[in-house]
Structures are given as structure tokens and as C-alpha cells.
Image (cartoon, coloured by chain):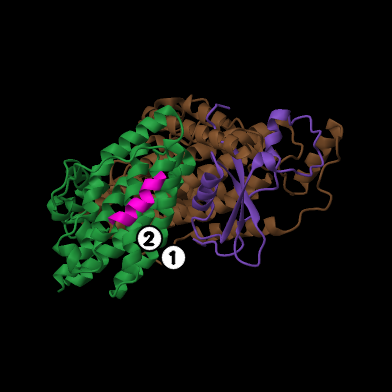
Chain colours: A green, B brown, C purple
Amino acid sequence: MNEKAVAYVLRLGDDALVAAQRMAALATWAPQLEEDVALANIALDLLGQARALLTYAGELEGQGRDEDLLAYRRDEHEFTSALLVEQPDTDFAATMVKLLFFSAYQRLLYEELSAGDDETLAAIAAKSVKEVAYHLSHACAWTVRLGDGTEESKRRMQTAVDELWPYTHELFASDSVWRGYGFDPAGLRERWLGIVEPVLAEATLERPVDDWAPTGGRDGLHTEHFGYLVGEMQSLHRAHEGVSW
Amino acid sequence: MDPRASQPAFIPGAAELLAEVEAAESLLDQRGPAGAAAPAGGEEADLLAHFEAVIAADAKIEPRDWVPAGYRESLIRQIAQHAHSEIVGMQPESNWITRAPSLKRKAILLAKVQDEAGHGLYLYSVAESLGANRESLLTALHDGKQKYLNFINYPTLTWGDVGALAWLTDGAAVVNQVPLCRSSYGPYARAMVRVCKEESFHHRQGFDLLWTLSQGSPAQHTMAQEAVNRWWGPALAMFGPPHRDSTHSEKSMAWRIKRFTNDELRQRFVDITVPQAEILGLTLPDPALAWNSERGHYDFTPPDYEELKRVVAGNGPCNRQRLARRRQAHEQGEWVRAAAAAHAAKHSREDAA
Amino acid sequence: MSQTEWPLWEVFIRARRGLGHLHVGSLRAADTTMALQHARDLYTRRGEGVSIWVVPTDAIGASSPDEKDPLFDPAMDKVYRLPSYYRMPEGAERL
């Protein structure tokens, strides 16, 4: 078993899974019916990525764990998703800002991985990069509309940007897992800023200063929100041992 | 990953219904009678005669054709109720998206709930082609002036309910909706072809979900059986009151907005569903259910119409909850809709300048 | 209609190369980008198209034999439109 590969792919899968779980919970809550359809599409894309990545992580691990055992039978501290994706959707502004930050990151990382040596991972990344490019354009369009919309929408967007910005640093924090396999996202921060800063500028939003930079998600140390997310996701599955669904 | 992979190959009745959808679809492709357009600026009597001739020839009425006010009103009422049912109907199922017990089921359920938003949109779009306005229809829904289907006011208490709801109420919906693929109003007929094709996936995934539970552990089997017990009555009641008590049926049938009575459709649903229940290994909660060889149909106990009246009047288990949530989502979205409108207004001025 | 109700757009989809765009329905959106994104999400969920056009409903001129129709008052003129909801002839998933 290539432990480094397993840990690397799990991070990608957990990011997608947690982002999908958050987005899927918004069904019926979108500001307009058309947007309900759009958010569900994004959630379905992310869920598809999570399934492919977790399945592959299980294969690499070689212990017989499939996507469901990895999603439903690990404890909170075994998930290595970034803190950003577990942040709650306090309003539509938070949802779109989170999507902007995350999809810009995913696009850059998947682009690199699609040209990588691991053929399976490259194939998953090549399929996913098209999906996240669309998520990114959706988030960019909404960021500009809402940032440069009404006073209220601008205020909400700026709040979301300020609250979520600190969590973006973790996406680019290098460690032995990131360095040990695939492509290290540490080098992507500048290019990420190259995508995000012009969008914030067009949206007439202020780019926050870089100071607080919380980490921990990659080591399984999450925010308090995460326990509820995992508890809800796993409740039914864990109530029935060894059955199929 | 094929959601149908584990499903038994044959679901009685399903193929027959889909064949009807496809037959209706191929009729839409054929050219209607030549000269179907009404004379320009005609007298109302001429316009009415023309309208009736189009209906009599089983041709389609299209947007901007002259139609009697009653035809327009009946259609808008029926289509709005259908659209509302799709969007409020997302609630009982979305209740389980975050807790779906496998990632495959989560994806299927989310896709289904998304389809319902899509169907709601197709239908509001049809209503808008008749001169209705979506915002006004939503206001009527939020104010309780327009209804949605009664079954949505029941809760999904377990994962079994997700399957039973889909198998029984989507099954009933397909039976109700297949004839609408031949509605006299062209945009409605075309929308319904699309909806029915997508609904048949919904129906099948519900069957597949229940089948898996029924074959599973004793606890899972019980979960499935109890859910079926809860949903059988609401599903039967979806066909509405008996024909003799139905206020809108006669005119709707004459105008070919509707093509079968409530009772005919309910019987058809029972006849299709009983063999499916046998394959599932689940029982339907009606001791009177039995094949009647003289009639060539199953006998069954009619649904509790008093309960139906109570639920339609607003006193089902979840009426208040469903409407409150619908209103809350709409109100929460107001600042977003306003901001997008303001942004578009600013930028169209800039573009013009 | 409220101040914030977004305008109506008509959606046309090319199911595959070699075919013309067909009208499939309408939707509401605040701007062109949103109309295109929503059209993609709503009308091509099962891979029904390779190209999408969106047109503000107000911008469509229509030949109509009954434009003096007494029952269409001016407020309803926004529904000038081509017959809607042509089926997608190719690639529709047959479930």
C-alpha cells in the first residue's frame, strides 16, 4: 500500500464530500427556483467527484474499504477535509463566496493533477476540472452581481468574504502528505489570487488582509460545526450494521 | 454505478405507461390540420367555432390562439397546482438528502429532488405562456389560495418513506400524468412528455429502494412495510374525490384538458400497483383488496375522502410546516433577487451609455 | 409583478450538430449570463444539448393571426412567443 497516495487522495475526496454534503443540504432553500436546480447540479458534481476519489483511495489502501465505508464509517477526526468546506451556509452570500474560493482552488489543483503520472487520478481530475470550471464561473457571476448589487447584498458579501478568507490559507499549507504525492497545492496560492482578486475587485468588494490562518482540517482537527455534519450524514447508515441500501 | 443494476428486470405496468408517453410524443411530431390558425380579428362567435373545431379534430391549441376564458382559467388552475406540487413536493424528500444511507442513494435522491424543481419550472413556464405570471402564482400558493397535492402534507419519518413515497405517489402521478401528454394545449402536452419520462426514473428508483429494503435485514423489511402502510392511503387519495363529487371534471374532459375520470385513473393505479407489491414482497394495507374476475379489475377500499377533505382544507400533519418553509425560502431569497435585479439595471444603463 | 421579479427569457437548444436550435421553454433570470447558466442547468440535465441561445421574451416578434385577440390585454403581450416545448429528438435519456 502506498500510504502517501492514500492520504493524498483522501484529502481530495473528503474536500469534495464535505462540500457536496453542505451544498446538498440547501435543496429547496435557493433564492429562486432556477438557482435550486443550479445548486443541485453543483452538489451532484461534487458528490460524483467524492465517490470517484473515495473509491480510488479505498483501492489504493487495499483493505476492502469502498466509498461508503470511507464516508460512513470513519470518525470525525479521520476526515482530512479543509476547514473551509465545512463552514456553515449562513446565507446565500456565504454559499457563493465559499464556492468561489473552493472552486478556484479545485480548478487549479485538478488542472495540475490531470497532467500527472497517476493515470487514475489524472482521469478523475480531467473529468472534474470541467465541472469545477463551471462552478467557478457560476460563483464569479454571483459574486459580481451581489457585491455590486444593493447595499444589503454588498454588506452580506463583504461579511462572507471577511469571515471565509482566513480559511483559504489552509488550502495552500504544505506538509509531508502534499509533498509526498501528486501535486503540492502550496505553489498555487499566487495563481489562486490571480483568479479571486480580480473578481472581488469587479464586485467592488475589499480583499481582506492576510492575518489569521487557522489550520487543522488536514490533520483531522476540525471546527465545532463538523461533528454535526458528520453525525447527520452517518446517522442512518451507522444504525444498521452490515446491510446494503 | 447504474442505479437500476440491482433492480428486478420487470416492473409490471411500467413499460405500458412509457409506451403511452411515447405514442403521445409521436403524435406531437405529426403535422396538425392545415389552416389551424384562426381568422384574424374575427368575431368572437367565429373564434369560438374555430376553437371548438380544433378541439374536435384533436389538434393542439397553441400560445396566442384565441381560447374561451374558462379554458384558460381551468388550464392555469390545473397547471399551477401541478407546478406547486412539484416544488412543495421537494420538501418531504429533501428531508433525507443529508442522511441518505449510501452515497449512491444520496446522488439519486438529490437528482430526483432537482428534477422536481425542474418540473416545477417547465410547468410555470407553460402557465406563463397562457398569460399567467409566476410571481403571482407563487403568491397565491404562499397565501394558501392555490393548492398542491394532498400527499405532500404527510411526513417522511424513515428512509422507508422515501422509497414508499416515490413508488406509490410517483407511480400515481405517472398514471395521472400520462394522459396529459395528449392534452389539447400544446405546450402542456409537450412539457408532460418530458416530465413523464423523467418521472419514470423517480418511480423506478423508489421501487428499487424499497426492493433493497424488503430483501434486506428484518429491520429494513419492517421499515419498508411500515412506510407502505403509511403511504397507500395518501397515494389513492391523489386521484381526488370520486367523479360524481369532482367540481371541475366535466368541463375539463370536454375540452380535453383531462381525458379520464378520477375513478378510472385510481382503478388503473391499483391494477398496476398490486402485482408490483407482490414482487416487492410487501403487502398493501387493505384487507378488501382482491382480484375481481368479472370486472377484470382489483376491488379495493376507497380512500378516506373525509381525511382527504381535511388535508386539502389545510389540516394534514404537515400543511403548516410545508407552507411556512416555502414562504421562508422565498422571503430569505428576496435580498438576492433584488440585488441581481439592481445589478442588471445598473449594467444595462452602462451598456446603453 | 414585484420590483424584483426577473424578466422572462425564451430558451433554444441545439440538440446536436446538424440540427437547428429548437425552442424548449422559458425561464426567469436577471441577466444574460444567468439566463444561459440556468438554461444549461434546467434544460440540459440529461445531456440534451450542445448549444444554447437565450432571448428576452420581450424581444421576440411573432407573426400571429389573432393579434387583435380581445382576451389578450396589453399586459399579456409579453407572451409573444413561438410554440414551446419541442421535445429533444436525440440523446434524451429514456428512463
Instruction: Tell me which amino acid carries mark 2.
Output: Ile
Would residue B7 be found to the left or right of residue A9 on screen?
right
The location of residue B332, given as percent across then percent down, is 40, 30
Would residue B64 be found to the left or right of residue A47 on screen?
right
Q: In the rendered structure, the residue with mark 2 lies on which chain?
A: B
Above or below: residue C3 compared with residue A61: above
Q: Specify the label residue A212 is tagged with.
A: none
Q: How many marks?
A: 2
The location of residue B118, given as percent across then percent down, is 50, 47
B214 and A195: which is toward the camera? A195
CA–CA distance in space, label 2 to label 1: 9 Å
Q: Is residue A197 magenta?
A: yes
Other residues around mark 2 within 10 Å, as few (<14) / some (14–19) / many (≥20):
some
Residue under the point 13% across and 49% down: A221
Q: Could you tell which of marks 2 and 1 lies nearer the N-terminus? A: 1
Q: In the rendered structure, the residue with mark 1 lies on which chain?
A: B
Other residues around mark 1 within 10 Å, as few (<14) / some (14–19) / many (≥20):
few
Q: Which residue is mark 1?
A: B10
Residue under the point 37% across and 43% down: A96
